[in-house]
């Protein structure tokens, strides 16, 4: 099973395999791909799973994209934020609940629906406060 680069686990995040060294993630190339860049609405970015190199899986968000590349955003186990442009063929969209990392500041009503959003958002804010302490 390929290893996963993900944020520290919370009660709401499913567990994943061990973390590969940061050297496994490709360098920041291309800096910006050719073509028109599209951005998702703030805090409503789609979750994606990427395989930047063989044997490494990274769960994160697609914060921008072109016809050929996707800007992947994720937080590693050390709490460091990363952004990398990857070829679109290396990523596929997943559900938020399937991601090994879930952004605690998501627009919960967008991802979960209004009925589930209030309890989930309160839990996420509490978890973020505990992690910050």
Image (spheres, rainbow, N blue to C red):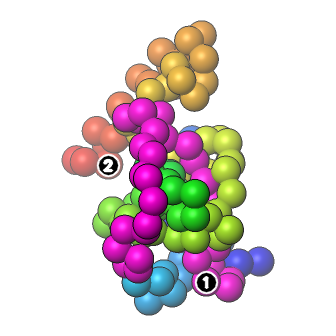
Q: Residue at x 52, y 70 (%)?
A: 86
In magenta stretch: residue 47: yes
Q: Residue at x 51, y 56 (%)?
A: 66
In magenta stretch: residue 78: no
- 72 left or right, relative to 127: right
Residue beneath label 2, please?
131
Residue 39 versus residue 111 in the image, above or below: below
Label at residue 53: 1
The residues colored magenta run: 28-57
Q: For numbered disc 1, what is the local secondary structure?
A: loop
Q: Is residue 55 visible?
A: yes
* Alpha carbon distance from label 2 to label 1: 30 Å
Give the x, y percent position of residue 111. Answer: 57, 28
Residue 115 versus residue 30 in the image, above or below: above
Farthest-out residue, bottom? 23
Label at residue 74: none
Query: In the rendered view of the protein, which quadrant contains the N terminus?
Result: bottom right
Residue 66 versus residue 85 in the image, above or below: above
Q: Earlier in the sequence, mark 2 or mark 1?
A: 1
Chief secondary structure of the magenta portion: loop
User: In this orientation, which residue lies closer to the viewer: 129 or 103?
Assistant: 103
């Amino acid at each position: 099973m390929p290893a996963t680069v993900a944020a520290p686990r919370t009660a709401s995040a499913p567990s994943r395999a061990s973390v590969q060294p940061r050297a496994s993630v490709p360098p920041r190339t291309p800096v910006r791909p050719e073509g028109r860049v599209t951005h998702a609405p703030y805090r409503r970015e789609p979750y994606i799973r990427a395989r930047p190199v063989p044997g490494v899986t990274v769960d994160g968000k697609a914060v921008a994209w072109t016809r050929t590349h996707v800007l992947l955003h994720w937080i590693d186990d050390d709490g460091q934020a990363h952004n990398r442009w990857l070829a679109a063929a290396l990523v596929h969209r997943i559900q938020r609940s399937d991601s090994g990392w879930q952004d605690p500041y998501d627009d919960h009503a967008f991802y979960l629906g209004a009925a589930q959003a209030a309890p989930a958002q309160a839990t996420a804010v509490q978890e973020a406060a505990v992690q910050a302490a």
